[in-house]
Image (cartoon, rainbow, N blue to C red):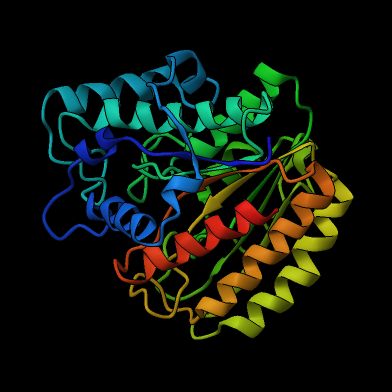
Amino acid sequence: MGKTGFVFDERYLQHQTFNGHPECAKRLTAIMDGLAGDGLLDDLVKIAAKPANQRWIETVHNIHYIMKFEEACLWGLPDFEHQDNSICRESYETALLAVGGVLKAIDAVMNDEVKNAFCAVRPPGHHAEANQAMGFCYFNNVAIGARYLQKQYDIEKVCIIDFDVHHGNGTQHIFDTDNSVFYYSIHEHPSFAYPGTGREFETGFSSGEGFTKNSPVLPGRGDEEYREKLLSDLVPAFKEFAPEAVLLSAGFDAHENDLMSGTNLSTEGYDFVNDTIFDLVRASTGGRVVSVLEGGYDLQILPVLVANHIRKLMAI
């Protein structure tokens, strides 16, 4: 207990996207090289990934969608449902392994083998809807993780915090009528930032009304706006919900160096994001949290930000 777990598998590199695609295997090799160079890998507890059982995928995704994705990969199609969603024959199995890595990290945390964990997995997941692939995402890793916590470990209240610069439309929509999962997202909106959802008035529906909180940040803004919105939006809502477990959709594409967005969050700004979230986690769950990689596409700054994030995890 007290250690930070780490999920990575060489098989995550087998999901090959077309040449020039931003969500590429080089993202993970850059992260691994950076962690090795910083000497952090030796201080982390390695968690072995295994493909998720389909029954856990079905807690979030429709069976017909799952089969359609599998068939597209078996046929060797170049993309799935949209040209942005580049795939290869190995993509389906890799996506199962990404979910499985997150579930194994949850097991390790819930069984007190580690205090918290970071999952360096791909493909990412937070844009994936129950019945649709979107934004490089096929299975919603974090959403499935939330259902796993509830069904496998009888956790009643799960909080998902998403700080990817792109709104996690899939995660929000999966839980928008659910009062047992609180979804918070801070992201760029409006402008060219994908996917165009995540406005302040999107707060959930029916029994889920009030259990979604969005903090849109205007393009060109950065540290000051993130600080203000996290303190005014996330902190009180998190404390009121008082979750038993916390999952993070950890996106590192809000950085000023990342060309996939128009926000200007600095490296120090990301430190404030980490500190604010982990202070809440410490008070609510004693430091138990599983963080899952989403975006982050600048291969120079991505490993720096991930290493800083992991250092903060280790210090909880």
Q: Is residue 174 above or below residue 103?
A: below
Residue lying at the far right of the rendered structure = 240
Image side of residue 254 versus residue 172, left or right: left
- The image quarter containing residue 157 is top right
Count how many numbered circles sit on residues in the image.
0
Q: Residue at x 54, y 60 (%)?
A: 309
Q: Residue at x 53, y 55 (%)?
A: 310
Quadrant, the N terminus = top right
Task: Let me know if residue 201 appears in the view.
Answer: no
Query: Residue 218: x, y in percent?
Result: 55, 79
Query: Residue 273: x, y in percent?
Result: 63, 67
Q: Residue at x 41, y 34 (%)?
A: 139
Query: Residue 316: x, y in percent?
Result: 70, 53
Q: Residue at x 43, y 20 (%)?
A: 52
Task: Out of 260 and 213, give the one closest to the viewer.
Answer: 260
Query: Residue 13: x, y in percent?
Result: 23, 41
